[in-house]
């Protein structure tokens, strides 16, 4: 397993978001985390990705326990080994789509030309090469999400975390994003943790994990 | 599926043998359920009797004679009427799933495990169809989408029922 999260608890004030959730992900596997609104699926993703520290329980990534790492170590891990896609692309509006995709490589010290060449490859694979020079504000929602997927994959992460990546798209655009996302991830052997409440989106995964009231009672294959 | 009217529609393009009709039907509409020859020739016999098709030619062969069928003007009218009439939507009021949930609660077995198992089964089929859709042409995509939207509707019902199980348990107990 590349990720093993066990018995995670997390509360916000008096509200328990997670109450004993577990998640295991194998290398290269696409796992859908499903459940009704407020069930704790996004909190589970945030804990597993090291964005939020659980109150209790352990998250082990590739043999390393996240809680035993320092903040800078966790940040470095997120930057180099993880990719993220959220419901709204969260692209930097002042940068072109190409610059957005190249950004994670630039932050890690890759020279501009090499980073942008790599960004162009990803944009082509996600079928949005024609918006490379455009600013995020001038592209459609579907194109923006594909750019966000390209940015998440540009560092060749071992795990891609996607939180409702098609939540803001119509069904045709959403499906195209899912097709391109899962194809690109599978080609690279990137594992995907996909949070969604939509069955049609979850159908692109290898298996699903259901979150209910902060727990993962049924691990269904 | 109205096999007879579909045959008539296929014959509008020109006369065909029974075997050609079966092949055209299976390719376009058969999906996982190809027609048997018995169905093909029983349907053609009925269409002949009702004068919606006629024998266009009879060709002798090594085995039985091969008949070629052509659509009649009455057949064309039949196709026109069929295409212009809306299909009656399924009422979906007789559901085995619903019956299982209620019986599980009535017999004190609990319904959560049943709902979870059903969800997994639905998602398994949805994965299969999604895969097929990705590999298929636009016709495959549309027929798979039709199935996927129905399965998704079932799943939404399963979620809603899971959320209201306590309420339903009270209602069936009273």
Image (cartoon, coloured by chain):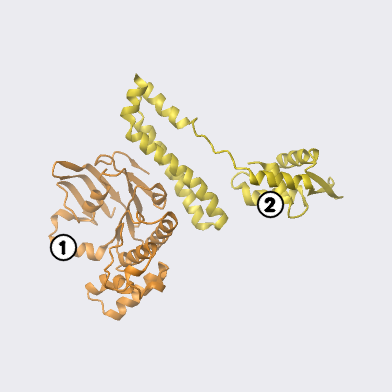
Chain colours: A orange, B yellow
Q: Measuring 39% from the left and 32% from the top, which residue is drawn there?
A: B114
What is the secondary structure assignment of the residue under circle 2? helix
Query: Where does the N terminus of chain B fall, quadrant-wise?
Result: top right
Residue B92 in picture, x, y percent from top left? 50, 34
Instruction: List the residue tagged with mark 2.
Output: B24
Which of labels 2 and 1 is toward the front?
2
- Relative vertical location of residue A86 with respect to residue B26 in this rendering, above or below: below
Residue that carries the numbered disc 1 in the rendered image: A73
Question: Could you tell whether A101 is left or right of B6 in the image?
Answer: left
Chain containing mark 1: A
Real-space CA distance between mark 2 and mark 1, rounded to the nearest whole angstrom: 63 Å
Q: Which mark is residue B13?
A: none
Instruction: Pick whichever, A152 or B145, lies toward us.
Output: B145
Q: Residues within 10 Å of mark 2 (few under 14, many from 20)?
A: some
Looking at the picture, how far across and down is residue A32, in whole percent? 34, 50
User: Considering depth in this image, is B172 or B116 the residue closer to the camera?
Assistant: B172
User: Is residue B107 visible in the rendered structure shown here?
Assistant: no
């Amino acid at each position: 397993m590349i990720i093993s999260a066990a018995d995670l608890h997390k509360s916000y004030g008096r509200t328990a978001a997670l109450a004993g959730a577990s998640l295991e992900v194998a290398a290269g596997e696409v796992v859908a985390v499903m459940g009704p609104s407020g069930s704790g699926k996004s909190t589970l993703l945030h804990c597993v990705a090291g964005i939020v520290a659980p109150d209790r329980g352990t998250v082990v990534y590739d043999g390393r326990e996240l809680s035993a790492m320092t903040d800078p170590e966790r940040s470095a891990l997120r930057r180099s080994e993880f990719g993220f896609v959220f419901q709204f692309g969260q692209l930097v509006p002042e940068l072109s789509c190409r610059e957005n995709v190249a950004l994670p490589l630039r932050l890690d010290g890759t020279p501009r030309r090499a980073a942008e060449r790599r960004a162009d490859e990803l944009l082509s694979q996600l079928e949005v090469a024609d918006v490379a020079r455009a600013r995020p504000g001038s592209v459609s929602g579907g194109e923006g999400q594909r750019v966000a997927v390209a940015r998440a994959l540009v560092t060749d992460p071992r795990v891609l975390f996607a939180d409702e990546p098609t939540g803001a798209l119509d069904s045709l655009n959403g499906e195209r994003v899912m097709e391109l996302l899962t194809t690109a991830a599978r080609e690279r052997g990137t594992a995907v943790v996909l949070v969604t409440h939509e069955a049609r989106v979850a159908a692109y995964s290898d298996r699903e994990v259901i979150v209910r009231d902060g727990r993962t009672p049924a691990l269904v294959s | 599926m109205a096999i007879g009217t579909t045959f008539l529609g296929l014959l509008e393009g020109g006369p065909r043998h029974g075997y050609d009709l079966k092949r055209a039907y299976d390719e376009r509409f058969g999906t996982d359920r190809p027609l048997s020859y018995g169905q093909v020739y029983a349907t053609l016999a009925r269409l002949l009797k009702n004068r919606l098709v006629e024998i266009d030619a009879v060709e002798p062969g090594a085995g039985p004679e091969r008949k070629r069928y052509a659509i009649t003007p009455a057949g064309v009218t039949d196709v026109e009427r069929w295409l212009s009439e809306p299909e009656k939507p399924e009422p979906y009021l007789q559901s085995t799933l619903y019956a299982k949930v209620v019986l599980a609660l009535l017999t004190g077995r609990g319904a959560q495990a049943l709902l979870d198992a059903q969800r997994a089964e639905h998602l398994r089929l949805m994965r299969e169809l999604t895969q097929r859709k990705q590999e298929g042409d636009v016709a495959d995509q549309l027929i798979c989408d039709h199935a996927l939207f129905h399965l998704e509707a079932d799943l939404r019902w399963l979620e809603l029922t899971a959320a209201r199980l306590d309420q339903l348990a009270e209602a069936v107990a009273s």
